[in-house]
Image: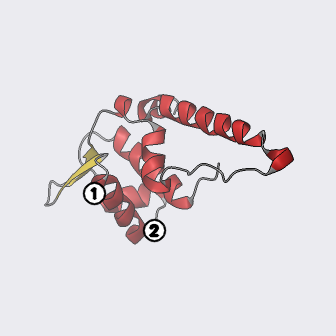
Amino acid sequence: MRISARTQYALGAMLALAVADGPVRSERIAASQDIPRRFCDNILLQLRRAGLIHSQRGPDGGYWLARPAEAIALADVIRVTEGVEPAARPFPKAAAPLAHIWDELRDHEDRLLGAITLADVVAER
C-alpha cells in the first residue's frame, strides 16, 4: 500500500484535532504538522465535505472533529484522501492464484486500518 503525502498530511491534521480542546484554526494545524498552508486548507475542505470534521468562521472559529476520536478510524481518513482501491486487474494464467492473495491483503489492510482509531494513536503518544 502506498500512502500519499496528502494522506499523511490529512492524518496529521486529524490527529492535531483529536488532541485539541476546541476549534483549531487552519494556520495552527498547518504550522504544527508542517503542512504547506494552501495544501492544508484543501485537505481540511476535503475532510469537511466528507463529514469527518466541522468548521466555523470567525474569531472563535476553526476546525474540530465531527465525531469523537474513538469513532474515527484511520481507514475513514485514508478513504477520503486515497479513495477506495479498485480490484487488481485479472492475473493471467499461471499468476491467477495471486488474485486471491491480493484480495486477502486488501481485506487485511482494511480490517487493520479500520480497527485503529484516532484515539488509539493519540493514546500511544
- Side of 72 where 5 appears, left or right: right
Residue 14 or 93: which is nearer the viewer? 93
Q: Is residue 72 left or right of residue 78?
A: left
Residue type (three-letter) at the residue carrying disc 1? Arg
Residue at point 32% right, 51% down?
50
Most extreme residue toward the right is: 94
Residue marked by disc 1: 25
State the separation of the CA atoms marked 1 and 2.
Answer: 14 Å
**On screen, 39 above or below 122?**
below
Q: Position of residue 13 (x, y in %)?
A: 41, 51
Residue at 55% across, 36% down: 110
Residue 88 image offset from top left, x and y in percent: 65, 51
Indicate the quadrant where residue 57 lies.
bottom left
Q: Which mark is residue 76?
A: none
Q: Which mark is residue 36?
A: 2
Badge 2: how crowded within 10 Å, few (<14), some, or many (20+)? few
Extreme residue in the bottom direction: 38
Q: Is residue 79 above or below residue 124?
A: below
Quarter of the rendering containing residue 37? bottom left
